[in-house]
Amino acid sequence: METCKNCKTEVAVHDVTCGLCEYPLQGTEQEQSTFIAKQIVQKSEVQSSVENLDKSRWLLFAIGIFNLIFPFLSGADTTTLIFNAILGGIFCGFGFMTYILPKLALTVPLTITALYYLFLLLLMPHMFWSGIAIKVAILLGMGYGLFSVWKADKILKANPYLASVMMKKK
């Protein structure tokens, strides 16, 4: 018996690849180095995705808290207070939901926000263009977080060994 250089599990001497991580046991040094480099890059991309998800989560919380607090500071009427309280609660809820279902928790508020901005553009263009930099930052923040989650999910589905290693670190 030998030990896999990548995952340190025992493998048979005649095995071509590791049964656990698919490391090319009988491969050339270049093939083995390429495999290790690919593992490192994929692990880094998944870790980066987790960081981007955290940023998107905090963006959802920030939007929710803003909607909860701003109407009180601006002296809004009761209807606006109730609407913004509901909206703030929804965004904070999606922030918490990113811990369980990150793709859904980012897709829904991103879609709602994009549709709201489209509504503003079509019906009240002056309100759409007011604060456009913030609106773009919000869409890009949620969109990039969602893209990162999709990318990490794809990597982890294609690499079950890396998925098991990343789950152990949680």
Image (tube, rainbow, N blue to C red):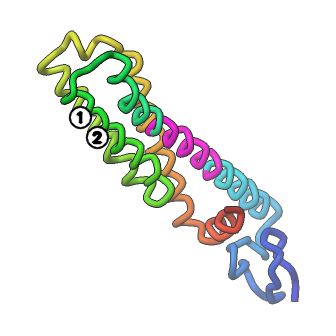
Q: Are marks 2 and 1 in contact (CB under 8 Å)?
A: yes
Q: Secondary structure at mark 2?
A: helix
In the image, residue 106 sits, relative to residue 82, either above or below, namely: below
Q: Secondary structure at mark 1?
A: helix
Query: Is residue 18 shown in magenta?
Result: no
Which corner quadrant of the image does residue 104 belong to? Answer: bottom left
Disc 2 target residue: 86
Rendered residue at 25%/26% (across/down): 117
Disc 1 target residue: 83
Residue 79 as seen in the image, left or right of residue 161: left
Dominant secondary structure of the magenta stretch? helix
| Residue 146 appearing in the image | yes
Query: Is residue 51 shown in magenta?
Result: yes
Viewer-side residue, 51 vs 14: 51
Q: Say what amino acid the circle numbered 2 marks.
A: Ile
| Residue 150 appearing in the image | no
Residue 46 spot, x, y in % from top left: 61, 52
Q: Say what amino acid the circle numbered 1 marks.
A: Phe
Magenta range is 46-60
Which corner quadrant of the image does residue 25 belong to? Answer: bottom right
The quadrant of the image that shows the N terminus is bottom right
Residue 149 spot, x, y in % from top left: 49, 50
Q: Residues within 10 Å of mark 1 (few under 14, many from 20)?
A: some
Rendered residue at 73%/79% (across/down): 18
Residue 114 as seen in the image, left or right of residue 120: right
Residue 118 spot, x, y in % from top left: 20, 27
Q: Residue furthest right?
A: 2
In the image, residue 115 sits, relative to residue 151, either above or below, namely: above
Residue 41 as seen in the image, left or right of residue 27: left
